[in-house]
Amino acid sequence: MTFTDAPDGLASPDPAQAALASRHPANRPRVLSVANQKGGVGKTTTTINLGTALAATGERVLIIDLDPQGNASTGLGINRAARRISSYDLLIGRSSLVQAAVATDVPNLSIVPSTPDLAGAEPELYATDDWAHRLDRSIDATITPGLGSDGSPLFTYILIDCPPSLSLLTINAMAASDAVLVPLQCEFFALEGLSQLMKTVDQVRETLNPRLAIQGVVLTMFDKRNNLAVQVAADVRAYLGDKVYDTAIPRNVRISEAPSFGQPAIIYDYKCAGSEAYLRLAGEVLRREKTFRAA
Ligand SMILES: Nc1ncnc2c1ncn2[C@@H]1O[C@H](COP(=O)(O)OP(=O)(O)O)[C@@H](O)[C@H]1O
Ligand SMILES: [Mg+2]
């Protein structure tokens, strides 16, 4: 799907919607979409490990698995039986976020799992007027009933693991988000796909969600012995400047092993180079969040 064949909800901005989108109550969780329409660039790995690192600093983190493949759910050890309520139920309005959230083995980290029926959600969503705002609304709905027993919000961060497309699922994620975090693999066509992604972010900002920002771009699976990767990384940094995090995530076998144990790499082997990089990345993300909040 491209934006040119997007239904009306996206093409014609509704002023009431724009006002709703710019509202940002202090206890609404910060919402970050981890997005890139390319598959295999490290979205899910980044979502899981950044979520774990943020949870380790005391944030209350919820991951929403918005990819029908459900890799984030599997990678966090959520078996099929535990996926009774999924992100599909959220989107079609059959469940609330609080009902759909499942605790993981990582303290402070919950997930709304995904199921394959998410792949069939698009036609159902198209049939509704407010398709683009489904996820946004379900997050808004947690603000008051989502208060914990001490009056604090249930979640302080929501990370959305997007599917590898600029589909209506990704647009739902962006419409609900404060910022987009883009994992980028240093390969030849990296920048080409990026400009299309940035165009989508601009369009969502103009039509659905004026507060949408770019949190940053993280170089993933970086191999400093590979000349092409080094050259592409230099080009990306020259082109995007300080949008690119200082931390690059190295290619690291421990990171690729961890999901088969249903664990974030940071839990599986917190000392490996990949885990250390994700912990540093979380520090950068939090520093940027401070400046976003101050703005
Ligand atoms: N830094 C890394 N080092 C080694 N393997 C990685 C790294 N990051 C991701 N991978 C592996 O690459 C594959 C694609 O990553 P994934 O996070 O699933 O990408 P996406 O969600 O964008 O499709 C997975 O098998 C994952 O384990
Ligand atoms: Mg993925």
Image (tube, rainbow, N blue to C red):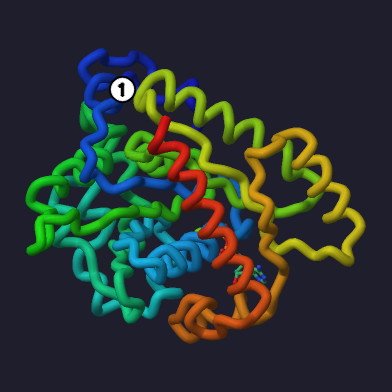
Residue for point 39% across, 38% down: 293
Q: Quadrant of residue 60?
A: bottom left
Q: Could you tell me how many numbered marks the image carries?
A: 1
Q: Secondary structure at mark 1?
A: helix
Q: Residues within 10 Å of mark 1 (few under 14, many from 20)?
A: some
Q: Quadrant of residue 98?
A: bottom left
Q: Position of residue 280 (x, y in %)?
A: 59, 63
Residue 271 as seen in the image, left or right of residue 107: right
Between 193 and 244, the residue placed more toward the observer is: 244
Q: Position of residue 25 (x, y in %)?
A: 21, 36
Between 294 and 228, the residue placed more toward the observer is: 294
Residue for point 31% across, 60% down: 62
Q: Position of residue 213 (x, y in %)?
A: 47, 33
Q: Quadrant of the C terminus?
A: top left
The residue tagged 1 is 9
Residue for point 40% across, 58% down: 68
Residue 77 as seen in the image, left or right of residue 147: right
Between 60 and 191, the residue placed more toward the observer is: 60
Tell me the kind of residue under disc 1. Answer: Gly
Q: Position of residue 124 (x, y in %)?
A: 26, 41
Residue 177 as seen in the image, left or right of residue 255: left
Can residue 167 be seen at all in this image of the molecule? Answer: no
Residue for point 50% across, 31% down: 201
Can residue 102 be seen at all in this image of the molecule? Answer: yes
> Looking at mark 1, is its residue's CB closer than 8 Å to ligand 2?
no
Q: Is residue 198 above or below residue 264?
A: above
Q: Is residue 42 above or below residue 285?
A: below
Residue 224 as seen in the image, left or right of residue 282: right
